[in-house]
Every structure is written in C-alpha cells, then in structure tokens.
C-alpha cells in the first residue's frame, strides 16, 4: 500500500484523463453559456429557496423548501459528490455572488473589453489586504456560523438570514474589491471546499507549459474579448493545486491555444503538492474535523442536554456550547495533533525540518479523514430525512400546493438499517487514504526513508485512533 | 505556436436572452408563484394560524375575526416539534393530527348568523394541552366593508 508513486498502491499519481480532449467537453467549457445556464437554473432554485425560507417564517423546518434543499440535499450532494468528485464545481454554479459579479462586469453573459485597457470593470477595484489573503477569515466565519447552527438549519428564517447575509456581503465586497475577492477570502462555504478540493478527482491544469511560457499576452490573466482574466486572481498557467481555483472556466475561454485541460485524476494528488502550505489551511482541516464531531453529537447523537445547549434552551448552556465547541476546534484538536507530530518528529531523529513544517505538512492527512467524517455524517442526514424532499418539491411554499402529485408522500426513512455499515465503510476508506498520504507526506517531509518511517508511525496511530473514535461515535 | 482558438462572446440577441433567463429565474418566478397562489385561493381571505404547545405560544392568533358570510381559507401550520390537531366542530372542520412542520388547509364559508366558534387542539401535545384553544369570532354582515 505504501508506495510513494501510487495512490493506495494502485493508481499512479501522475495518471490523468483529459476530458477536454473530447470536442463536446471542450466546446462546452469554451462557451460563455457555460456556466451561465447552470447559474440561471440555480438562480431560480435560490429564488424559490429564499422565498420559501421567508414565507416559511419561524416554524419547524422539516417541511420547508429552503431548509430541505439547503441542509438535506445541497449539503449532502456537496460533501458526497461535488467536492470529492468535481472539486470546486459548486463555486462554478453558485448563484450567491452573482449579483456582485454582474455589478462589476455590467453584463450578464458578455465581455466588456477594451484592447488598450483590457477587461472593463465597474466598482472601486481595491485589493484585499495582504495580511488577510489566506483562509483565516473563512476559518473564523465558518466556525462562527456553526455557533448558530440550530437556528440556521432548523428555522426557515434562519436559512434566509444566512443566505441573504452572504448575498449582501458578496455584493458589498464586490463593489469595493477586485473580482472574486469575496469568494476567495471571505465566503464561509468557500474555505472548506478549497481545502477538500485537494482530494478531488478532477483538476483544471495547463496542458503544455511551454506554450504558456512562450505566450506573451497571457489572456488567462489579463483577459481578452472572449473572456475575463482569472476572476480568482490566479495565474492559470501556474496551477498546481485545486485550492483556490473556483473552476469558473474563464481560462478555457481566454486561452488562444486551447491549452487548458479539465483532467480526471487519482484522488488526493494535490495533498502532496508542497507549495503555499500554511497554518491557515492546517487549521481549516482541524476546524472541519471538529465541526463534524460537534454536529454529529448535537444533531444525531443521543445527548439531549447537548441539543438543548445548541438550541439555546438556556443562555448558560448556549455559552457553554460556544466555548467548548470553539475550544475543541481551535485548541484541543490542534494540540492533540501537535503532540503526535512532535512525537513523530522526535522519533525521526535530528533533522533540518522545523516542527512547524512537519505540523503543517501532516495536517493534510486530515483531508481524506475529515471528508470521510462529513460523508458519514451525511448518511445520517439523507437516509432518514430524504423523503421530505418529495413533499417540499410539490409544495415549495407550504401553501397547500401539489405541483407534481407527491405532496402527500409521508416521511419515510430509507435504508436506515444499512446506515452503520455505510458509515463504517466510509470511515475505513477515509482512513486508508489518510494512512497512505500520511506515509507519503512523511517521506516528502523528512526525505530520508528511515526517518520518514519512524516519523510516520505516530501519525498512523493518530489517524487510526481518530477513525476508531469517529466510527464509535457514528455507530456506538 | 498553434492557431488562435478564441470564440466571440454572445452578441446582442445572446445578451437579451440572458436577461430573459435571469428575469425568468428571479422576478418572474416570484410573480408567478404569487399569481398562482392568488388564483388558487380566489376571493377567499387566507388566515394563517400557527400552532404551538401552549407553553411555547399556543395557537396564534387565538382570536380571529371574520364576517358572517365571508369565504375564508384557514391554514393551520404546525410550527412546533410535536404533533397538534385542529377542530372547529361548530363548522364541521377538523383534522386528527398535523405533524410537525406540516399544515392543514380548510376552505369554509362563515354562516350568515354570526356567532363565536371555538377551535382547539385534538392531540395530547403537552401538559398544558387543554389550554390550546382559540376563537373564531363572526361579526355581523354589516361589518363587511
């Protein structure tokens, strides 16, 4: 299993299937109607979601279109399919920053371009502060939203408040700052997709770097009459990781030489790209793992007092939840992880690798494990609650409609007997990937094979213990 | 170097189509939903009653004024986390249980002879269940504007 050139000892790390070699895919990605048509559909969906969440008021959310589509369907599809399979494809079709982007471009589907000035934008076009050009804001915003998770996920008006706040914030920041600054550095949904997309099985990359090297006009960066320079403020010809690529496909439209590729690849290859790794991304991994545990315990666990705390039944209980949850994500998990990394670092023997470097590098082992924990958590959402979707699709505003004749399908949990097995399999698969990448990261960090072996043992122990703990939590 | 492969962006008609799609997805969707609902309800006045256990808020509103002869649609929405029932026996209206999050809709015409009609919950929803009740007060037809 532990081969440095293959994922799980099976798939070569450098295996790629270029999807854009198929003319239909290439044409699709070069067209300005992609992703516009998908965005228009999602605009329709989110219009209905916001309207339903608004007219749904303060009531219980199990028969509300907004609650059901966002927290049952979207979240599950995001964690189970989109992020592991299609990287940040949700960002491709996310309608939340649309208005802000249209206000910048002053066009819906066209391109405003001047041969001398390049792409034309409205707004103040400020640059985001350098000190905040990382994941810290997203880390704290996402953690902050989980303090109100009961309100956001069970009250229709809570879902409305959350989505509407994101839309307003994106509009304000889009007017002030350049391009997709909001998505890149602020959006709470963006951060975990950024980190977990390193595990995804798709990527946007350059086909032939020599073409880009010799190409002076760099349409993918500055834009041209066919498309915008990278809205995510990146250099597409230098893509090495999925992290900050929002998959808007503008670089496919602006590349004069069709030199951009959408590739299928083995999962997790970006976890081994030793470039721009920082503590903010490590903390994103800790926070996501911590939230998965807290969410499971408060939403699907048997601890009633915890539900009361999260539901703000009493103020002291609610504050206890916030303090413990924040401490768990920001202090306890990072500290335990540090202890294991430090142990491995000592076992590795004298080396020039700083402990911080080893700490950050090994944190990427938590990506497959964290994603698996979220997928396992998602089984517990979709299987018991998925049948609510029939009702709300037929009666989206709870006005007594029956558009498709399925409004009266009763709540019917499905395959819940299989749930523990699905959760076990999910966690075991996540563990296998995590162990595999832990070993590869140890070799990458310590170079010398014997030292890497010694350093990997504590990390493999941590991952196994964490998986055992999570599995016990899910099925215990 | 290979040959340039740029595609022109959509022209005027493309931009117009994009606007149509965006408006259809947003403004027209909201308008269509409201119009459809208005058409469905017709000339009935829609009265929404939120149902929660008495200690959490009871029926709201608990006193509803209608006019004798008026056509109304009662939408009883269970916004609680436990089931509630609804009965308005004098007008032969009721449902055994409305599950959490669900609602029940009753179309009725208020009788011409004005009176007060009591409604109440029919599910033992809490220790305060017996307090979960309200009144439909039918005003005389002269009150109609």
Image (cartoon, rainbow, N blue to C red):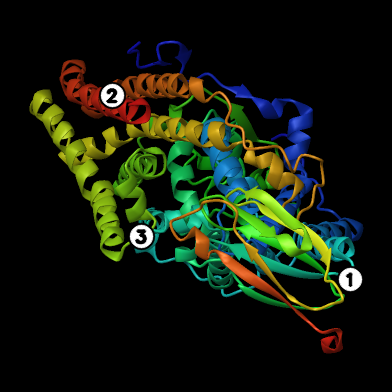
- Left or right: A20, with A323 as reference point: right
Does label 3 or label 2 sit earlier along the sequence?
3
Does the residue at mark 3 contact the one at mark 2 (Cβ under 8 Å)?
no
- Element under disc 1: loop
Estimate the x, y position of residue A285 in percent, counting from the top left. 34, 41
User: Mark 3 falls on what kind of element?
Assistant: loop
Same chain check for tags 3 and 2: yes
Helix, strand or loop status at disc 2: helix
B98 vs A297, nearest the viewer: B98
**Is A369 situated left or right of A358 in this image?**
right
**Residue at (50%, 31%) from the top-left corner?**
A379
Residue A346 pos. (x, y %): 9, 29
3 or 2: mark nearer the eye: 3
Q: Tell me the crowding category of disc 3: few under 14, some 14 to 19, or many 20 or more residues within 10 angstroms, Cα based.
A: few
**Residue on which the image places disc 2:** A468
> Residue A103 is drawn in which quadrant?
bottom right
Rendered residue at 81%/65% (across/down):
B34
- Seen from the viewer's position, the closer of residues A201 and A373 is A373
For the C terminus of chain A, give its image quadrant.
Answer: top left
Estimate how packed mark 2 is, as few (under 14), some (14 to 19) or many (20 or more) residues with alpha carbons within 10 Å.
Answer: some
- Using the image, tell me which numbered label, if any, was put on residue B43: 1
On screen, residue A25 above or below B28 = above
Tell me which chain the residue with mark 1 is part of.
B
* In the displayed structure image, the side of residue A200 where residue A328 appears, left or right: left
Q: CA distance from mark 2 to mark 1?
A: 62 Å
Return the mark for residue A313: 3
């Amino acid at each position: 299993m532990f081969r440095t050139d293959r994922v799980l000892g099976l798939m070569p790390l450098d295996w790629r299937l270029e999807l854009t070699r198929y003319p239909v895919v290439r044409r699709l990605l070069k067209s300005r109607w992609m992703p516009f048509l998908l965005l228009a559909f999602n605009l329709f969906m989110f219009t209905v979601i916001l309207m339903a969440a608004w007219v749904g008021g303060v009531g219980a959310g199990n028969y509300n279109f907004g609650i059901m589509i966002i927290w049952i369907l979207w979240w599950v599809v995001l964690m189970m399919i989109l992020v592991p399979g299609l990287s940040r494809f949700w960002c491709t079709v996310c309608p939340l920053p649309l208005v802000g982007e249209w206000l910048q471009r002053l066009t819906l589907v066209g391109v405003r371009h001047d041969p001398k000035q390049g792409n034309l934008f409205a707004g103040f076009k400020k640059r985001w502060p350098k000190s905040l050009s990382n994941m810290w804001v997203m880390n704290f915003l996402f953690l902050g939203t989980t303090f109100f998770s009961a309100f956001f996920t069970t009250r229709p008006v809570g879902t409305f408040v959350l989505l509407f706040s994101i839309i307003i914030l994106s509009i304000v920041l889009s007017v002030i700052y350049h391009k997709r600054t909001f998505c890149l550095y602020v959006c709470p949904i963006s951060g975990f997709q950024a980190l977990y997309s390193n595990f995804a099985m798709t990527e946007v990359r350059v086909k032939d770097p020599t073409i880009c090297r010799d190409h002076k006009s760099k349409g993918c960066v500055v834009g041209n009459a066919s498309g915008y320079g990278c809205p995510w403020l990146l250099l597409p010809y230098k893509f090495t990781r999925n992290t900050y690529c929002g998959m808007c496909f503008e670089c496919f439209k602006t590349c004069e030489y069709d030199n951009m590729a959408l590739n299928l690849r083995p999962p997790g290859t970006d976890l081994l790209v030793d470039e721009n790794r920082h503590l903010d991304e490590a903390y994103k991994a800790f926070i996501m793992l911590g939230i998965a545990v807290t969410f499971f315990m408060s939403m699907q666990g048997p601890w009633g007092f915890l539900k009361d705390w999260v539901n703000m039944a009493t103020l002291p209980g609610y504050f206890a939840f916030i303090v413990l949850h924040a401490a768990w994500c920001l202090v306890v998990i990072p500290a335990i992880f540090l202890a294991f990394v430090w142990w491995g670092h000592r076992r590795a023997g004298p080396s020039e690798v700083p402990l911080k470097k080893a700490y950050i590098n090994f944190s990427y082992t938590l990506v497959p494990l964290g994603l698996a924990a979220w997928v396992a958590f998602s089984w517990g959402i979709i299987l018991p609650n998925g049948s609510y979707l029939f009702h709300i699709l037929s009666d989206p505003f709870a006005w007594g409609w029956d558009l498709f004749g399925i409004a009266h399908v009763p709540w019917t949990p499905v395959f819940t007997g299989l749930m523990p097995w699905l959760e076990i399999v999910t966690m075991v698969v996540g563990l296998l990937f995590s162990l595999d990448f832990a070993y590869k990261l140890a070799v990458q960090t310590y170079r010398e094979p014997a030292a890497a072996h010694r350093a990997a043992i504590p990390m493999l122990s941590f991952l196994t213990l964490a998986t055992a703990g999570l599995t016990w939590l899910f099925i215990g | 170097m290979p040959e340039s492969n740029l595609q022109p962006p959509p022209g005027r008609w493309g931009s117009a189509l994009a606007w149509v799609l965006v408006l259809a997805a947003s403004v027209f969707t909201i308008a269509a939903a409201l119009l459809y609902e208005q058409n469905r309800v017709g000339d009935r006045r829609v009265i929404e009653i939120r149902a929660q256990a008495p200690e959490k808020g009871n029926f709201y509103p608990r006193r509803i004024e209608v006019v004798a002869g008026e056509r109304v649609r009662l939408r009883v929405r269970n916004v609680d986390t436990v089931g509630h029932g609804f009965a308005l026996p004098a007008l032969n209206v009721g449902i055994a249980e409305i599950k959490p999050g669900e609602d029940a809709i009753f179309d009725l015409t208020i009788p011409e002879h004005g009176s007060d009609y009591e409604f109440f919950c029919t599910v033992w929803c809490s220790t305060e269940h017996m307090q979960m009740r309200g009144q439909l007060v039918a005003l005389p037809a002269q009150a109609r504007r």
